[in-house]
Image (spheres, rainbow, N blue to C red):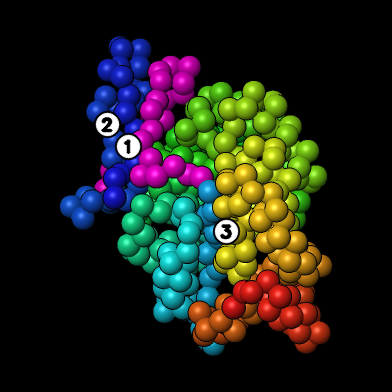
């Protein structure tokens, strides 16, 4: 597994303090590395206006990158055994990596639990697959701390949502994302989850971050409503430079693909269907793409009835029924409970879609 490496040209006197002249190994730590002993806070990622930066990825961040769900034991502790079963199952599929994000219930985990989750994920031999860690938080200091810890555990990139409990000014939001980007040497995916939580990220800021750090450092997961037009707006505002990913669970994957996304971030529950759609799109086979897509839409429509908790409830129901998770428990509090009639419809649709 190659490390993600940032290489810089020999610095001039003007840039000597902005960057380290030598290549900086990032991504998964070597066994001999003393992870966490060298603070990233002392080394800023130099903006492209100062010098050019080049990243060598272990594999390109692209394709199907499912979100990992967090399993809990009957006494509400992180279920490490179930987590490893989930990861092992995912790695048998044709994926390009995996992530933690909103349906990982990150906002319902304690600081220790989120770090434990990322440590466990980072410990798994994933070959050439990427691990993208969700590090969004309610303060800049929290987000940078999560970011630094996740990179110590071997993540290959980060995904960051803005704070969700309060609206922030444009300068504060700029500082938040810039601080996270400068705290680590791995790429950062800016996630706008405002269609279901938090505030929309101004397009002006997206463009500014991309211009400052470049498309190898800054990528996007735009989920503001309406998703399709917002994807096109980002693409056009950045002259096609923005690398964007969709996270609709699959229901908008074909429309998003035609608007230029580089990958999709679904849950694990319908992963085989999403892979089938993506593979067909990549092969230019529209008939096969729609054949896999339409049953997938029926399943995701059931999740959409209850927003984020609708997704999590059905995801965990399926992973528990599949035998991957020991329980289907979610972190409380929540409003939505999966009723028996919805379970029955999920089972019927899963059967029709040849999903087990």
Quadrant position of residue 11: top left
Q: Evaluate if marks 1 and 2 touch, with contact meaning CB atoms under 8 Å apart.
A: yes
Q: Is residue 254 left or right of residue 25?
A: right
Q: Are marks 1 and 3 in contact (CB under 8 Å)?
A: no
Whole-number angstrom distance, CA of label 1 to CA of label 2 = 7 Å
In the rendering, at what x and y percent does residue 162 appear?
A: 63, 46
Residue located at (69% from left, 25% from top): 237
The residue carrying mark 2 is: 23
Vertical comparison of 353 with 35: above or below: below
- Does 17 appear above or below 289? above
Using the image as rendered, state which of residue 50 and residue 157 is in the foreground: 157
In the rendered structure, which segment of residues is drawn in magenta?
37-62
Image location (x, y in percent) of residue 36: 30, 50
Name the residue that disc number 3 marks.
Answer: 275
Residue 282 seen by the camera: yes
Nearer to the camera, 147 or 67? 67
Quarter of the image where one finds residue 341: bottom right
Instruction: Identify residue for label 1.
Output: 5
Disc 3 packing (10 Å; few <14; some 14–19; many ≥20): many
């Amino acid at each position: 597994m190659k490390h993600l490496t940032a290489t810089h040209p020999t610095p001039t006197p003007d840039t000597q303090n902005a960057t380290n002249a030598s290549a900086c190994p990032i991504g998964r730590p070597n066994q001999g590395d003393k992870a966490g002993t060298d603070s990233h806070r002392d080394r800023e990622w130099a903006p492209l206006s100062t010098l050019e930066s080049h990243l060598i990825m272990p594999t390109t961040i692209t394709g199907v990158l499912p979100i990992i769900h967090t399993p809990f034991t009957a006494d509400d502790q992180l279920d490490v055994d179930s987590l490893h079963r989930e990861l092992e199952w995912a790695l048998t599929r044709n994926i390009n990596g995996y992530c933690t994000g909103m349906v990982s219930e990150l906002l319902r985990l304690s600081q220790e639990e989120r770090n434990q989750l990322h440590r466990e994920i980072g410990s798994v031999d994933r070959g050439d697959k990427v691990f993208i860690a969700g590090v969004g938080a309610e303060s800049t200091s929290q987000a940078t701390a999560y970011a630094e810890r996740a990179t110590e555990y071997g993540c290959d990139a980060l995904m960051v949502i803005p704070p969700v409990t309060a609206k922030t000014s444009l300068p504060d939001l700029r500082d938040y994302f810039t601080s996270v980007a400068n705290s680590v040497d791995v790429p950062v995916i800016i996630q706008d989850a405002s269609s279901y939580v938090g505030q929309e990220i101004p397009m002006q800021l997206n463009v500014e971050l991309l211009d400052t750090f470049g498309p190898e450092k800054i990528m996007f997961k735009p989920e503001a409503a309406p998703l399709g037009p917002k994807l096109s707006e980002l693409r056009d505002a950045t002259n096609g430079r923005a690398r964007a990913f969709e996270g609709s669970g699959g229901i908008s994957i074909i429309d998003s693909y035609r608007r230029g996304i580089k990958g999709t971030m679904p849950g694990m529950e319908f992963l085989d269907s999403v892979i089938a759609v993506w593979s067909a799109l990549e092969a230019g086979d529209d008939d096969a793409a729609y054949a896999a897509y339409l049953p997938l839409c029926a399943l995701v429509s059931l999740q959409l009835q209850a927003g984020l908790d609708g997704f999590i409830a059905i995801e965990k129901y399926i992973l528990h029924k599949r035998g991957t998770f020991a329980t289907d428990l979610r972190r409380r509090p929540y409003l939505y409970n999966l009723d028996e009639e919805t379970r029955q419809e999920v089972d019927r649709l899963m059967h029709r879609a040849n999903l087990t």
